[in-house]
Image (cartoon, coloured by chain):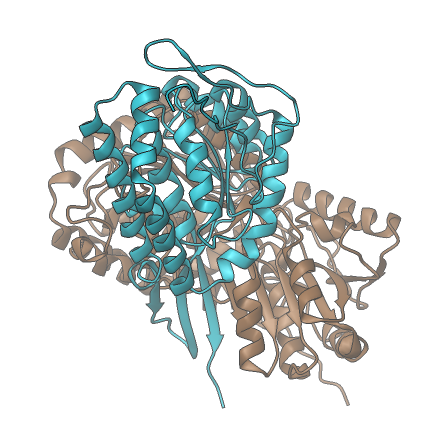
Chain colours: A brown, B cyan
Amino acid sequence: MSFEYAPAPESRAITNIKPKYGHFIGGKFVTGSKHFPTINPATEEILSQIALAGKSEVDAAVKAARKAYNSTWSKTSGKERGKYLFRIARILQERAREFAVLETLDNGKPIRESRDTDIPLAAAHFFYHAGWADKLEYAGLGSFPKPLGVAGQIIPWNFPLLMLAWKVAPALATGNTVVLKPAESTSLTALLFAEVCQQAELPAGVVNIVTGDGSTGALIVNHPGIDKIAFTGSTEVGKIIARSVAPTKKSVTLELGGKGANIVFEDAAIDETVEGIIDGIFFNQGHVCCAGSRLLLQENVAEEVLHKLKKRMEKIRVGDPLDKNTDVGAINSKEQLAKIVELAKVGDDEGGQRWSPACDLPKKGYWFAPTIFTGVTSAHRIAREEIFGPVLSVLTFRTPQEAIEKANNTPFGLSAGVWGEKGSRTLWAAQHLRAGVIWTNSFNKFDPTSPFGGYKESGWGREGGRHGLAAYLKGVAGE
Amino acid sequence: MSNRIDVKKTYKLFINGSFPRSESGRTYEVKTSKGAFLANPCLASRKDLREAVVAARSAHNGWSKATAYNRGQILYRIAEMLQARTSEFIEEIMITTGATKVKAEKEVLQAVDTLVWFAGWSDKISSLTGSNNPVAGPFYNFTIPESMGVVAAVAPENPSLLGLIESIAPIITSGNTVIILASTKAPLSAMSFAEVLATSDLPAGVVNILTGKKDEIAPWMASHMDIDAMDISGLSSKLTAEIKVAGAENLKRVHSFKRASAHRITAFTESKTIWHTIGV
């Protein structure tokens, strides 16, 4: 017997997308000069026209942020700063449905995820950091913690509002003002967030949002009026930023790519593990820097795990992101789809065995079926390079030592997962893995209290928790 | 007795617990502050650096997994060995730099005390910089500082012994291993300090000391893909940007410090967060 799911689409009536947007500078929306379209990747429908910030707009935003820092925000007590952040958290909760629908339209992620993960976590980040604003001297980061000034923040398209929250909340709590640039393909929720700042009566210029592409990002990175750069994105761009700021006094935090290992020991609870593998790689279409994209199976259970994984994958529902039953939505952009297609082809060419469940992909929009590659070795490109899509590379190992060696055999070091019922062994593995975030018998969990960030080429610094505050305070890096 | 000829020391490198000459066969002349010949220490090459990195990388797993108590005791043991040879170090610093006895003695004793200070940090830094995170879910979630791996350091020109130890001690306290380039003009006490290390139960490869030219070796350090971080306190600020640009190739953490502090330990640690599932 099999059940068919009737369509259960979330209504988009709650959103109010304008035909054209400008930038949010000094507390006001200002019109842009050049524009580019933003589309719904599930349908290729043009949702709106987004402004492309050039030098004069970035200059104006930095100037507004500096003015707000000097005249208002640096003179606002931690207690009062915190209250603004609490207000923002509450407004995000009040308008959560609107944000979730807008995020899904612009990004392509399933409404189940934007509704249950992205937006609630974004609100939680503001609520958490609000409480820090008047307690910074207790954070163990110096007796008189001081903000850095104006922070330039550049965020990716995979969790648009959530990444905004990860950046803006700690920056404001610690007393900095910001110039934020959302990713070019997902600007809409950031622009809606600008309205939230207005509703919260946040002083003008404390948060400035300029939209654009990589050229706008470069203008922010190289702007002499900015004290700190916080970037989430690819390792490639992270290295360019690291080089650009090398001759300057800017402080930098980078949250970059990963190739997370998900290790399954022979004593793992297989059914739970299979759910975890699915969460690890197919959550958010695999557009996750900390995705568990390398599955390491102990040889004697590999066959059983793969059998059950394939059966489970046959039940994954790929399709309309607004449908409340959808598990995997659309690939965020044409460019990203091309990259995934290309790397999957490399997987074929290098001798990996590709498998995907039968699934009817919509005719319009950008789609990629959930895919696994078996017969992969550590030397294969699909085991080394970040695909940033729903593609899992499967490797095997015999001993725990071999699992660790294979897991650590990567220039990245962002995340890893360990599955097994023996607590001492899972913690032994956690201890030996060279990665910043490790989940035992779980994957892809996030919380504002929990520091997140990578070892090695996965980045510099942490976001979230007590540790994340250090990224926005003077003199705690050690110099 | 006055006609007796002194037996002089040959100053070599310190790599993987041994004292090899530079593979390049190169040396350079070090003179006393008055200009008299003193010694021909090694002019380390890029290959010496690479061999030191191999040694430091192999030593990292053992050293970082040693207990904090054990690392603390070994750091304390280094202090004991240095204390016992105080007079030799004072004399070496005086003859090399022209420092007065009072000044040289102050430097050596402060070096001993610095080692003792960091010895005591090894089993405390986790308690102070780690955290237990109250996540909204059934997880025991905690963050611990861990060593970064292999750190390359450039010691300041002077104080040549104290500056070297202020760099080495915090790096190895948390479990990192280190390759350090000693003061170019006053490298002798660094190489004598290697003898102290060699008799302190410090595992081979945890500390490797090179002598040579900073502008030659530091860029090789910065571009080496198996070095995780750098302490460039001893480098001219003119070279900082160049080092950071080269280091970006594998996103090295590059830091510079003015004095000894606990920040020098935390700058070379990486925070690891573990989500341990709770359930019956």
Q: Quadrant of the C terminus of chain A?
A: top left
Residue at 34% x, 33% y: name it: B161
Residue at 78% x, 44% y: name it: A342
Q: Can residue A276 be seen by looking at this rendering?
A: yes
Residue A265 position, x and y percent, is 67, 76
Q: Can residue A323 be seen by looking at this rendering?
A: no
Question: Left of A178 or right of it: where is A181?
Answer: right
In which image quadrant can residue B227 be found? top right
In which image quadrant can residue A70 be found? top left
Q: Residue furthest front?
A: B1
Residue A372 position, x and y percent, is 77, 63
Residue B174 position, x and y percent, is 41, 54
Residue at 15% x, 49% y: name it: A143
Question: Left of B99 or right of it: where is B254?
Answer: right
Q: Residue furthest top?
A: B35
Residue A41 position, x and y percent, is 62, 49
In front here: A196 or A279? A279
Q: Quadrant of the N terminus of chain A?
A: bottom right
Task: Examine the rendered structure and indicate whether residue B211 appears above or below residue A414.
Answer: above
Task: Examine the rendered structure and indicate whether residue A264 appears above or below residue B18.
Answer: below
In front here: B269 or A184? B269
Counting every numbered tag in the picture gives 0
Task: Examine the rendered structure and indicate whether residue A278 appears above or below residue A231.
Answer: below
In front here: B96 or A227? B96
Question: Left of B3 or right of it: where is A365?
Answer: right
Task: Examine the rendered structure and indicate whether residue A343 appears above or below residue A280.
Answer: above
